[in-house]
């Protein structure tokens, strides 16, 4: 039978891919998005779009709520921590209450890198949480609400801690879209920028793999899972790979390091394989090619 699914942030980068996957398997999908960063044209016409700001309470009729609506820019979180908390904490409480009223399962997309902070080895789900940005702090607070609601109300909501997600539809206008930023600027022959020495490392996971994890989590019975690759790539290496994907040669201009940037961020994803039957399948070079093809037209 078709599942009634609600996707908050469903007009955004990851959310719109989730909507496509749910529709492809025959689900009934409602998107809740205020279109502040999401785009109406990313929402398939087969889905119902409700324009709404998750900072305000809302109601749903659903079996599963995929809560992806977020303020996801680290720099913005440091400049406007109150706004960041309103979207990421209050918005999550509103999603939890909507799911509780509907008797629905909730899947919450948290962040791995921003929650664990600096790591010496791939962080597993029991690693110490030491966020170094307001964004990470807000996401950790939202996780506490999800897990608290599970204890208080006997629900089985799931938390997915995502690594650095990339892929088609990612906005080059946001700090987190480093792959899109590099590709679009390289394609136009414009200057690319790297903050610090570029040796800071990240765990880059393709959006298609993340969507598979989200759908698997929608059928899970609670838990916290890292979603990444377990492989770290420096920003310098990412820049070289993006240039190679486009068939160009270019060196970035280097600027000072930014407040809130972790030096090393990589996730241990073994629990997701055990608990969700999920593992990443798209290597970085292939994912970059899949990301570039729609941009190239």
Image: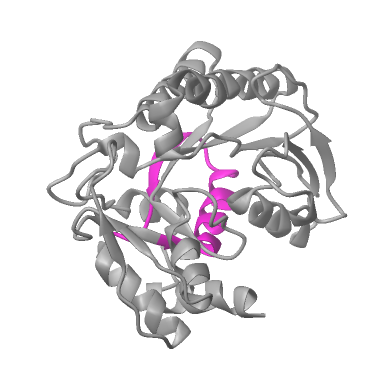
Place of residue 118 in the rendered image (x, y in percent of width and height, measured from the top left): 19, 41
Q: In which image quadrant can residue 100 be found?
A: top right
Q: Is residue 186 above or below residue 41?
A: below
**Residue sitting at 21 percent across and 37 percent down?**
127
Q: In which image quadrant can residue 58 be found?
A: top right
Q: Left or right: 123 with respect to 280?
A: left
Taking the image as drawn, is residue 202 in sight? no
Place of residue 150 in the rendered image (x, y in percent of width and height, measured from the top left): 50, 20
Question: In this figure, what is the number of numbered marks?
Answer: 0
Q: Is residue 73 above or below residue 26?
A: above
Place of residue 52 in the rendered image (x, y in percent of width and height, measured from the top left): 76, 28
Q: Which residues lie in the magenta part?
A: 205-230
- Say whether residue 156 is magenta: no
**Residue sitting at 78 percent across and 49 percent down?**
40
Residue 140 versus residue 237: which sits nearer the camera? Answer: 237
Q: Is residue 183 above or below residue 204?
A: below
- Say whether residue 217 is magenta: yes
Q: In which image quadrant can residue 250 be found?
A: bottom left
Q: Quadrant of the C terminus?
A: bottom right
């Amino acid at each position: 039978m078709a599942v009634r699914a609600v996707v908050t942030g469903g007009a955004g980068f990851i959310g719109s891919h989730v909507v496509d996957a749910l529709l492809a398997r025959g689900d009934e999908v409602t998107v809740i998005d205020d279109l502040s960063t999401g785009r109406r044209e990313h929402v398939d016409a087969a889905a119902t779009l409700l324009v709404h700001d998750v900072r305000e309470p809302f109601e749903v009729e659903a079996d599963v709520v995929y809560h992806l609506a977020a303020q996801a820019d680290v720099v913005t979180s440091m400049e406007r921590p109150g706004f960041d908390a309103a979207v990421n904490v209050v918005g999550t409480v509103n999603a939890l209450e909507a799911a509780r009223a509907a008797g629905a399962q909730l899947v919450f997309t948290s962040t791995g890198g921003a929650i664990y902070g600096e790591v010496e080895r791939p962080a597993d789900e029991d690693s110490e949480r030491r966020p170094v940005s307001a964004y990470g702090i807000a996401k950790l607070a939202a996780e506490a609400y999800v897990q608290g609601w599970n204890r208080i109300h006997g629900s089985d909501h799931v938390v997915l801690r995502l690594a650095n997600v990339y892929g088609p539809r990612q906005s080059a206008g946001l700090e987190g879209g480093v792959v899109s930023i590099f590709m679009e600027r390289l394609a136009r022959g414009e200057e690319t920028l790297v903050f610090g020495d570029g040796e800071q490392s990240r765990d880059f996971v393709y959006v298609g793999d993340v969507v598979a994890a989200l759908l698997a989590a929608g059928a899970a019975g609670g838990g916290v899972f890292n979603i990444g690759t377990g492989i770290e790539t420096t920003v310098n290496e990412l820049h070289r790979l993006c240039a190679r994907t486009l068939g160009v040669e270019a060196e970035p201009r280097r600027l000072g390091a930014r407040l809130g940037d972790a030096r090393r961020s990589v996730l241990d994803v073994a629990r997701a394989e055990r608990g969700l039957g999920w593992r990443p399948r798209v290597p970085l070079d292939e994912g970059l090619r899949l990301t570039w093809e729609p941009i190239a037209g």
